[in-house]
Amino acid sequence: DQQVKQNSPSLSVQEGRISILNCDYTNSMFDYFLWYKKYPAEGPTFLISISSIKDKNEDGRFTVFLNKSAKHLSLHIVPSQPGDSAVYFCAASAGGSNYKLTFGKGTLLTVNP
Amino acid sequence: NAGVMQNPRHLVRRRGQEARLRCSPMKGHSHVYWYRQLPEEGLKFMVYLQKENIIDESGMPKERFSAEFPKEGPSILRIQQVVRGDSAAYFCASSRATSGDFPSSYNEQFFGPGTRLTVL
């Protein structure tokens, strides 16, 4: 029962181009969404988040878009840099237990110089 | 400005032994969370603790697993009589309390580097 799905295990992009990572969810109770980045042998690092009352949140090179009707969110990285190469996890939480993050399986992003 | 600390980083146990994983939250953080990541999977929530209290252990297996966060010292995740299926990366996260006893809706959890448990 996977409530948060990242259907692309990997993505390869050229430096300077846009990276788009996708995430779908099934639980309509989710109202807060987060993206984490993870390097090998390290823990996940918080990147950016969005509340369900918004459809876009931007922070520097990172923008997250939320389409509630489609239960879909995406992370855009522009321009992509080699240092962005990592595994990206989409996570979600639901109101009353907002501390309980439900993670997707992750997408390995490789940015080629 | 130390982040979340976990030790050991790697732990090897034989079937039937006990595993103890330790987590020291970031300074100023009073909420601790444990997650488990099985191979090729995302992180799965196990338990949420505050000092001396288990708030939500809905993700913990009913047997052999326990967690504590004492008044003094690190949080401990204990796995008794380990089996091969317990082999995974175990991540601890911490966050600060804002108003009341619960984290804010901006639930930024800071993760430690994880403990990789291997059961032979």
Image (cartoon, rainbow, N blue to C red):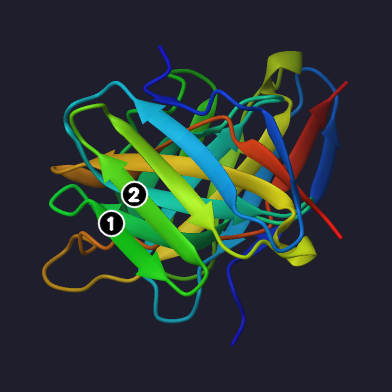
Identify the residue position indicated by label 2 in the image: A65
Would residue B117 be seen by someone viewing this image from the given angle?
yes
Q: Is residue A40 above or below residue B41?
A: below
Q: Is residue B103 left or right of residue A37?
A: left
Q: Nearer the viewer, residue A66 or B79?
A: A66
Question: Residue B111 at x, y = what percent?
Answer: 55, 59
Image quadrant where one finds the C terminus of chain B: top right
Please name the residue shown 76% across and 36% down the image: B117
Question: Residue B56 at x, y = what percent?
Answer: 29, 39
Please name the residue shown 32% across and 28% down the image: B58
Give the amino acid at mark 1. Answer: Lys
**How many numbered marks have been drawn onto this rendered protein structure?**
2
Image quadrant where one finds the N terminus of chain B: bottom right
Could you tell me which chain the residue with mark 2 belongs to?
Answer: A
- Which element carries disc 2, helix, strand or loop? strand
Q: Nearer the viewer, residue A102 or B101?
A: A102
Question: Is there a contact, CB below 8 Å, between mark 2 and mark 1?
Answer: yes
Q: Is residue B49 above or below residue A15?
A: above
Question: Residue A53 at x, y = what percent?
Answer: 12, 51
Q: Residues within 10 Å of mark 2 (few under 14, many from 20)?
A: some
- Which element carries disc 1, helix, strand or loop? strand
Q: Is residue A60 left or right of residue A99?
A: right
Q: Is residue A21 left or right of residue B114?
A: left
Identify the residue position indicated by label 1 in the image: A56
Give the amino acid at mark 2. Answer: Phe
Would residue B52 be seen by someone viewing this image from the given angle?
no
Question: Residue B43 at x, y = what percent?
Answer: 54, 36
Residue closest to the far bottom = B1
Sequence-wise, which precedes: disc 2 or disc 1? Answer: 1
